[in-house]
Image (tube, helix red, strand yellow):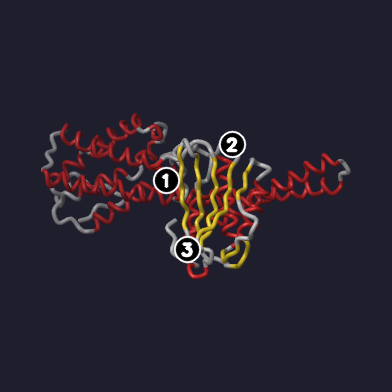
Amino acid sequence: MSANLTGHLSPDDPELSPITRAMVALRGQVLQAWMDEVRSAVPQAEDLSLPVLENTLPAYFDTLAALLTPNYSARVVTDLGALASEHGGERARLTLYDATALIHELQIFRDVLVRQLERHGVRVDEGQRAILFAHIDATIRESANAFTVVQAALREQFVASMAHDLRTPLSTAQLAAEMINHTSSDENVRRFAEKIVASTQRIDGMTRELLDRIAFCKTGPVRLRLERFDMAALVRDVVQSAEPFHAIELALGDDPVEGWWCGEAIRRAIENLVNNAIKYGSREVPITVTLSTTVERVQVMVHNQGPPIAPEDSESIFQLYRRAGSQGPGQGWGVGLPYVRRVAEAHGGSVIMSSSVEDGTAFVIDLPADARPFAGAPTAA
């Protein structure tokens, strides 16, 4: 005997145990009580249509009840996992839920089930209760995992589509500004046109960066094109490009700092840190970019004053599509710091973060001076 992923069990089915039949008979009452409580307790569920709110819960309920029939087939557990995953995936695609709302509504289901069984005099012994609770807990985990995977995929698709579509109007704006710059005899007009060209080029670079980061996170090990170059010159160039947008103090010596790295990847990683410092730091205090060296290693530090990153966010900010809790919605895509970490780790290096109210926030990319022995090292991000 196995519950069906889309159908319902019958309370009159003689193959079901008495406790399963009793649960199935209460399906309507349990689900209605659950929906009523979810609408009142989960803000994202308040305006959901009935089919979306109900989702896979009827089939899930029957499958859960089937677990209390002795000798149920192994497929019942498989079906339960499939229904849990589908529920999480649909919540990601069809609602404004976050993971907390998803977990909350399933915890409500567990509590409502217990109350309704007691209210209608359906006795569940300790063993049966343990089975139900264990599988509901597993459902919460599987639904949350599916929700996270689908939500990440949807965000990735949106970011990729947006970044791709932005490039056409940006190219048009850049071409128009270049034409103004070449045809106008007014020095002020030409100066403003140059700023427009520089800004559109920067935005175009950021959109290409978004597309590259998505590819970075999907293609497994990071592939680097290592070459010998002067890190001081690269850092100086990044700072000069960003200075029109924010005051930056550059601290580095006069001597070249040469080594073997992937120039394009390192450039974008540093640009990410500088962009974040501009975006989230204090507008009144200059950003500081420091290049330093130790024995066979090089460090690039980007420091800003402003609201600190909370200790509990010190790891999550390096996870894809996660942002520090203090950052408001819509302020970033949550993809920059994972990219920075992957670039650093692929060079055999690391990223160190320090943040406090007193000292501000600093990110340090710490790399071997010669990354060739470490190229393609495993990355955690």
Lower sequence index among marks 1 and 2: 2
Element under disc 2: loop
Element under disc 1: loop
Distance between mark 2 and mark 3 Cα atoms = 33 Å
Q: Amino acid at mark 3?
A: Gly
Q: Residue furthest right?
A: 185
Lower sequence index among marks 2 and 3: 2
Of residue 355 and residue 192, the one placed in the foreground of this image is 355
- Which tag is nearer the camera, tag 1 or tag 2? 2
Of residue 32 and residue 190, the one placed in the foreground of this image is 190
286 up-or-down from 374: above or below: above
Q: Residues within 10 Å of mark 2 (few under 14, many from 20)?
A: some
Q: Amino acid at mark 2?
A: Val
- Which tag is nearer the camera, tag 2 or tag 3? 2
What's the residue at 69%, 47% (across, down)? 200
Of residue 52 and residue 271, the one placed in the foreground of this image is 271
Mark number for residue 348?
3
Mark number for residue 314?
1
What's the residue at 54%, 44% (across, down)? 303
Q: Do labels 1 and 2 touch, CB within 8 Å?
A: no
**Residue 183, image x and y in percent?**
86, 47
Q: Do labels 2 and 3 touch, CB within 8 Å?
A: no
**Residue 191, image x and y in percent?**
79, 43
Q: Quadrant of residue 108?
A: top left
Residue indicated by mark 2: 285
Lower sequence index among marks 3 and 1: 1
